[in-house]
Image: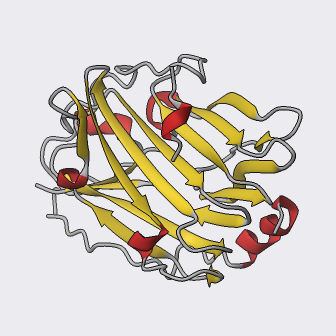
């Protein structure tokens, strides 16, 4: 079962306009420089295609964060789960679970504009989790080998926030889990501090990227995740206090030779 206990990301209506107002299409985003030889493979739009890569720098995304219908948890439904299909998603489907820790208020996860994932809390702590485990039409159970063993090879993951309104310091926690199978998986954990946000009452309006190497993922079970054989992955954002508004760009994997 998806573990809500390991929950890892001012109003929802106000936040729709806030994310859109600062969407520069990623023009100001800082990215690693990726060079290619004349006959190198082109940019890869989906993790599924990594199985066809021999040895060339490439960029892939677990999920382009497009067409995410709003998933909300509130006093009537404190935990809400949904599956959403998209051929551009790794495995063809994203599974979403959203929970409010205060049943009288709302937590919302949605796409505010193209390629922007938005999480908004309305006077409530809560969490949102996205799982990529293949097209199984099941948002509450992880298929630990559902992606079929994607080979990421050597490289690193980029985690980028596009904008953030933070009422209290240490308000947001990020967890990224990578599974080879149910018995071998690893986790990366970070808070808003990894982005250099060390004070309360912060508003960020320029993209900030954190580069995460496979060695920064801590083994949780067995031998940990084998990044050459990825069966499932998840992103959990937990708001540890009220009034957090967050926009994220897609998680991207930069493969190197």
Q: Residue at x 40, y 46 (%)?
A: 176
Q: Along the horizontal axis of the image, is 16 left or right of 193?
A: right
Question: Residue 59, located in which quarter of the rendered image?
Answer: bottom left
Residue 72: x and y in percent read 78, 42
Q: Is residue 99 above or below residue 81?
A: below
- Work out whether residue 64 can be spotted: no
Question: Residue 118, located in which quarter of the rendered image?
Answer: bottom right
Closer to the camera in the image, 170 or 27: 170
- Work out whether residue 193 can be spotted: yes
Q: Residue at x 69, y 53 (%)?
A: 125
Residue 189: x and y in percent read 37, 53
Residue 143: x and y in percent read 43, 18
Q: Along the horizontal axis of the image, is 111 left or right of 222?
A: right
Closer to the camera in the image, 117 or 11: 11
What is the image's colouring?
secondary structure
Q: Residue at x 66, y 61 (%)?
A: 241
Q: Quadrant of the C terminus?
A: bottom left
């Amino acid at each position: 079962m998806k573990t809500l206990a390991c929950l890892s990301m001012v109003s929802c209506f106000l936040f729709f306009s806030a994310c859109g107002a600062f969407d520069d299409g990623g023009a100001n985003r800082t990215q690693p420089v990726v060079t290619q030889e004349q006959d190198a493979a082109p940019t890869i739009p989906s993790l599924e295609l990594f199985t066809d890569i021999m040895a060339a720098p490439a960029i892939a995304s677990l999920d382009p964060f497009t067409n995410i219908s709003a998933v909300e948890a509130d006093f009537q439904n404190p935990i809400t789960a949904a599956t959403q299909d998209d051929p551009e998603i790794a495995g063809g489907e994203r599974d979403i679970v959203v929970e409010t820790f205060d049943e009288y208020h709302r937590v919302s996860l949605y796409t505010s504009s193209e390629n922007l994932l938005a999480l908004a809390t309305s006077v409530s702590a809560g969490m949102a989790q996205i799982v990529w485990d293949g097209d199984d039409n099941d948002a509450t159970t992880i298929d630990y080998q559902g992606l079929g063993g994607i080979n990421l090879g050597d490289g690193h993951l980029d985690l980028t926030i596009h904008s953030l309104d933070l009422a209290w310091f240490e308000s947001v926690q990020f967890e990224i889990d990578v599974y080879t199978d149910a018995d071998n998986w690893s986790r990366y954990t970070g808070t808003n501090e990894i982005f250099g946000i060390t004070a309360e009452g912060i508003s960020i309006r320029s993209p900030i990227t954190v580069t995460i190497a496979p060695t920064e993922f801590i083994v949780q079970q067995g031998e940990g995740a084998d990044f050459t054989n990825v069966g499932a992955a998840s992103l959990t954002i937990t708001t540890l206090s009220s009034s957090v508004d967050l926009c994220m760009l897609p998680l991207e994997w930069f493969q190197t030779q």
